Image (cartoon, rainbow, N blue to C red):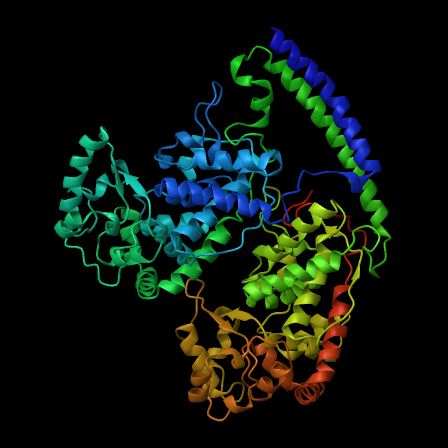
Amino acid sequence: MVYKEMAMVKLNAAAAVVLSLLVVVAVHPAAADAGGDWYGKKSIEETVRKEVEKAIKHNPGVGAALVRLVFHDCWVNGCDGSVLLDKTPYSSSTEKAAANNIGLDGFDVIDAIKSKLGAAVSCADIVVLAGRDASAILSGGRITYDVGTGRKDGVVSSAAAADAVLPESTFDFAQLKDNFASKGLTQGELVILSGAHSIGVAHFSSFHDRLAAATATPIDNTYASALAADVERQKGVQHTDNPAEKNNIRDMGAAFQSAAGYDAAGVDTAAVGALDNSYYHNNLQNRVLFKSDWVLRTDGDAAADLAEYRDNATKWDVDFAAAMAKLSKLPAEGTHFEIRKTCRCTNQNYYYGLGHDQSYMPVLWARLRMVKLVCFVVVVFMAAAAAMAGADRELKVGYYEKTCKDVEKIVNSIVVNSIKSNRGKGAGLVRLLFHDCFVRGCDASVLLEKSEMNMHPEKESQANIGIRGMDVIDAIKAALEARCPNTVSCADIIAYAARDASRYLSRGGVDFPVPGGRLDGVVSRSRDADAFLPDSAANLTGLVRNFRRKNFTVEELVILSGAHSIGVTHCTSFAGRLTAPDAQINPGYRNLLVSKCGGVSPTATNNHVVVNNVRDEDGAAVARAMPGFAARVRKARDYLDNSYYHNNLAMAVTFHADWALLTGKEARGHVVEYAKNATLWNVDFGDALVKLSKLAMPAGSKGEIRTKCSALN
């Protein structure tokens, strides 16, 4: 009873404490300490990396477990650390208990990292960081990618949910494809992520169907015989009827490989435990454990991807990194989140030991509801006050000089480093400004992820296919929140980042002052993006009408189109150009695009990416396709300049909307003008971006300063 009374005292005091803290925050918002000292610094990632390195040196197998942990956490309720929660007397079926999570490991490594980082860093962030570092170590440094931070830990963990959502090893191809599509991942990414089966182990129960005559899918007979024999041997060694076997035949002993007739050509057999493309060699030899691996061969496109990754290890490294980065961004679902004190239990259990005595649960929940009500009322009041205070703010250059020093320096530093790491991100940041501002004004609505309350935000729009740069915005936001919490809007970050990317990609040719003071919007609808963003297949009349309703002239339409000197696009965005007549497109360039797109009819499942600028294609290929053209192409790759206008006059541009500029006298005159005068275009492009960045939200719109750019406060 003493412990129950102590718990009640703590909870009775909680409302007063929470209220007083919130009042302090309301009066002194800059003094709020979100506990984010780790975020925005290298310390957190260095700590994670060192702990992961140490763990893998001690037990090489734990690396595969950490990679697997990312998938098994993020696939169920998003990346929320829910897979880490242990059972309690009142929650005996957490995700760990799911049949699909048999053999899941690596929890002790996560615990060790959490003990080093303390209460400021979420367990969900630790899971994705550790998975990234394990991938890098197991691939010998070939697989690297950026991982944004700022996730919160979920408080719900259900074995039933894990078994319902995680793909099963017995799935057929259609089931796998649908399962991945439900998470926003493509068929190509299904094949890519399956390559993680080059490492790790699997229990017999996960592949016994492959060895049973009645249920077996095609499997190499010698491999099946050797596997069946080893399973029986391992039952004795591991003292279980459900032993674990290595996923990769490469990692089995020489005797097993000989008995299985393993053809190791093209495989580095010395790289035991390496995360590499050996999985694809094995699959095409019918020497993989799971039915869900083998069924990838039953689809033509998937089978082609298997062969591609078998033959191109470097491409798989790059694509696997991109797929893991995308996986790590699956948003957490639900409504209640926290940053746990320990990764194995929620803070509620940590503080009050709810698992020991349920008799005071009704009173306890009543107290908790009171605390939440106080929080809700005060937060709503603060949000309303902030919105009203910001509604009349005018945009101003140097807006944050007094409230958050060096904002623009911090943005520029992260943007430049990101582009140095991946030059394509620069074009993504420039595009992001247009795709944000042209829909509902510059309100960062393009950054919002889907949620239970909004399943179709702007990101889901067909017009936003391939949009990127969000990870850079997230990194900037994390750095600024650590320095000046609740001060800098995501909308301002987008504008600053686009300016800095333009300056870097043009080697200083494009530069302009960016005013600040925008608020982040609370509305994001895919239908708005589809309605307002110009169609890549639009004619000149449609383009002019589209730009005029945003108060842009024909000249500014031509100026902003020059951004197509950088970046990439999907084949479905210019499918009509693949069969366009010679009067609209250079025949040699059309043939080059057809070869890049794998034919004249690209589809959603066969949607290759092509660079916007013919300058950035392989020079030899361009010379063969368009004799004489290559000599007139600038030599600087991925350079923001006036080369777009040279290309357009040569009818060597990707979009119909680009070529359409040549069909009107005024627009064509500007194309010729900017083709001749690079300096003029640099200046005019800067001016047009400033005007673009000032597009306001619809009258009467509510705004806030988000703490996380991908979600509402």
- Residue at coordinates 57% horizontally, 62% vertically from top-left? 467
- Residue at coordinates 51% horizontally, 44% vertically from top-left? 48
Is any part of residue 338 visible from this angle? no
> Where is residue 595 shown, x and y percent of the image?
40, 77
The quadrant where residue 689 appears: bottom right
User: Which quadrant does the N terminus fall into?
Assistant: top right
The quadrant where residue 150 appears: top right
**131 is higher (above) or lower (below) than 671:** above
> Where is residue 221 shown, x and y percent of the image?
14, 50
Tell which residue pokes out farthest to the bottom in this image: 628
Left or right of residue 515, residue 264 in this image: left
> Where is residue 203 shown, x and y percent of the image?
28, 37
Left or right of residue 385, residue 561 in this image: left
* Residue toward you, 680 or 142: 142
- Residue at coordinates 20% horizontally, 42% vertically from top-left? 215
* Residue toward you, 532 or 368: 368
